C-alpha cells in the first residue's frame, strides 16, 4: 500500500526513484557478487558497525597531542550521526530495507534491524572522513577512500539502496562540517573565557 497516488507529482517521483533503486540493486546482486568479494565486503562492513573503525581512529588521534582536536571532532561528528541520523532521520523516513521488499535477496551478513535511509555506515564514514580531510589532507584522502569502500560494501551486501548511500554521504559530510564549526566555536569560547 502506498501513501501517495501515482497522479501526485511527489508520488510519481518517489516511485521513479524506487524503480531506479531496484534496478541498480538488481544489477549489483545478479552481476557483481562473486567469490572473494563475498568475504571482503562483509569484513569492510563489519568495521563500520556502531562506527567502530572511526571510534578507534578518533581514540588514536586523541592519544597524540598534535591530533587531539581532530579526534575530538570526529567523536562529535559520530555523535551527531548517531543522534540526528540514526535516532532521528531513520525513523522519520522509515524506509524498508531492500531485503524486506525483494524476497530473493540472500544476505551475507546478519539482518540490520533499523531502517534503510540514510545509510548509517556511510554517514559515519563520510562524517569522520570529512573531519580528517579538513585537518589533514593526506590522512583524509585515505579516510575518504575507505568511506567509499564502506558505501560500496553496503550496496554489495544489499542492505541499502543507492539513494540511502547518497543520503548517507550528504548527511555525513554535513555532520562532519557541523562538528568542525561546533568544536571551533567551543574552542574559541574556552580560550576567551
Image (cartoon, helix red, strand yellow):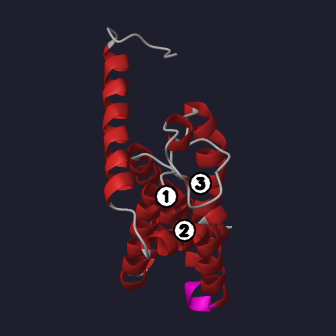
Residue 117 visible to an observer of this rendering = no
Quarter the C terminus occupies: bottom right
58 to the left or right of 160: right
- C-alpha gap between disc 1 and disc 2: 7 Å
Residue indicated by mark 3: 81
Q: Residue at x 56, y 85 (%)?
A: 67
Vertical placement of residue 78 versus 113, above or below: below
151 to the left or right of 103: left
- The residue lying toward the viewer, choosing from 87 and 77, is 87
- The residue lying toward the viewer, choosing from 82 and 77, is 82
The residue carrying pointer 3 sits among few (fewer than 14), some (14 to 19) or many (20 or more) residues within 10 Å by Cα, namely: many
Give residue 39's position: percent from left, percent from top: 51, 74
Give residue 75's position: percent from left, percent from top: 63, 68
Residue 66 within the segment the image draws in magenta: yes
Q: Residue at x 62, y 91 (%)?
A: 64
Q: Earlier in the sequence, mark 3 or mark 1?
A: 3
Contact between labelled residues 2 and 1, with CB atoms less than 8 Å apart: yes
Q: Which residues are magenta?
A: 64-68
Kindly indicate the quadrant of the structure image that contains residue 99.
top right
- The residue lying toward the viewer, choosing from 193 and 183, is 183
The local secondary structure at tag 1 comes to loop
Give residue 191's position: percent from left, percent from top: 63, 72
Q: Residue at x 33, y 32 (%)?
A: 19
Residue indicated by mark 2: 42
Give residue 34's position: percent from left, percent from top: 40, 68
33 to the left or right of 121: left
Residue 127 visible to an observer of this rendering = yes
Residue indicated by mark 1: 157
Contact between labelled residues 1 and 3, with CB atoms less than 8 Å apart: no
Q: Earlier in the sequence, mark 2 or mark 3?
A: 2
116 to the left or right of 79: left
- C-alpha gap between disc 2 and disc 3: 22 Å
Amino acid at each position: 500500500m502506498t501513501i501517495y497516488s501515482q497522479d501526485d507529482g511527489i508520488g510519481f517521483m518517489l516511485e521513479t526513484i524506487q524503480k531506479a533503486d531496484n534496478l541498480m540493486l538488481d544489477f549489483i546482486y545478479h552481476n557483481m557478487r562473486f567469490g572473494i568479494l563475498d568475504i571482503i565486503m562483509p569484513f569492510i562492513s563489519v568495521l563500520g558497525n556502531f562506527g567502530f573503525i572511526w571510534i578507534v581512529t578518533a581514540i588514536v588521534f586523541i592519544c597524540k597531542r598534535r591530533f587531539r582536536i581532530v579526534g575530538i571532532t570526529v567523536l562529535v561528528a559520530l555523535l551527531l550521526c548517531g543522534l540526528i541520523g540514526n535516532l532521528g532521520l531513520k525513523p522519520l523516513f522509515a524506509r524498508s530495507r531492500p531485503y524486506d521488499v525483494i524476497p530473493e535477496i540472500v544476505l551475507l551478513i546478519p539482518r540490520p534491524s533499523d531502517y534503510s535511509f540514510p545509510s548509517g555506515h556511510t554517514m559515519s564514514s563520510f562524517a569522520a572522513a570529512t573531519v580528517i580531510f579538513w585537518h589533514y589532507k593526506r590522512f583524509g584522502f585515505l579516510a575518504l577512500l575507505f568511506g567509499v569502500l564502506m558505501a560500496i560494501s553496503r550496496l554489495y551486501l544489499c542492505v541499502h539502496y543507492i539513494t540511502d548511500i547518497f543520503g548517507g554521504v550528504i548527511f555525513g559530510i554535513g555532520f562532519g562540517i557541523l562538528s568542525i564549526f561546533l568544536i571551533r566555536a567551543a574552542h574559541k569560547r574556552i580560550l576567551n573565557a
